[in-house]
Amino acid sequence: MKIALIAHDKKKDLMIELAKTFVNVLKKHQLFATGTTGRLIIEHTGLDVRRMKSGPLGGDQQIGSMVADGQLDLVIFLRDPLTAQPHEPDVSALLRLCDVFAIPLATNLSSARIMLKALEEEQIENQFHLRKDE
Ligand SMILES: O=C(CO)COP(=O)(O)O
């Protein structure tokens, strides 16, 4: 499965802890991340992560493009709903595209844990999302 991992600044520590907790699950999959999130995950877990640009510099849009192209199966995006983001339109666009293409999307720690637990137990199948044109 192809999984995107993204965290806003105040949620990065949570993302690192999440990645550490589920490192044995995550290492079985292809991982993608926005720039800073990816660097931190690599530094703290040694996981192989393909890094896009940083979120404010277009990373969310790059991930969104992958969603639109059917290149991602899961998105975990630990958002900070209490801090204004300069690239809020990019964030909204990515969340919207996940809904357009019915890609499983976790936007907080609790839903992310449920998603990774399901992945651990192999309850999520590859490419079960619907393409918009299907
Ligand atoms: O801003 C982000 C998501 O909107 C995350 O980007 P970084 O991982 O580069 O901090």
Image (spheres, rainbow, N blue to C red):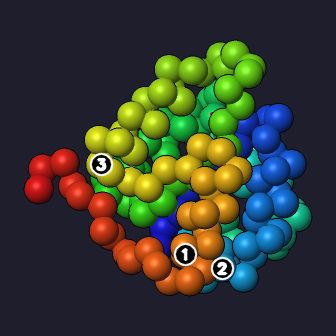
Q: Quadrant of the C terminus?
A: bottom left
Left-right relation of 114 to 73: right
Q: Which mark is residue 119?
A: 1
What amino acid type is highlighted by mark number 1?
Leu
Q: Earlier in the sequence, mark 1 or mark 3?
A: 3
Q: Which residue is mark 2?
A: 25
Callout 2: SS: helix
Work out how far the residue at label 2 is from the one at label 3, CA to CA, in angstroms.
24 Å
Residue 65 position, x and y percent, is 39, 44
Horizontal and vertical percent position of residue 6: 65, 47
Residue drawn at x 65%, y 45% is 108
Residue 63 placement (x, y as % from top left): 49, 46
Circle 2 residues within 10 Å: few <14, some 14–19, many ≥20:
some
Q: Residues within 10 Å of mark 1 (few under 14, many from 20)?
A: some
Task: Identify the mark nearer the N-term, 1 or 2.
Answer: 2
Element marked by disc 3 = loop
Residue type highlighted by circle 2: Val
Instruction: In this rendered view, identify the residue nearer to me: 73 or 117.
Output: 117
Would you say the residues marked 1 and 2 are in contact, meaning their CB atoms lie under 8 Å apart?
yes
Residue in front for this viewpoint, 44 or 22? 22
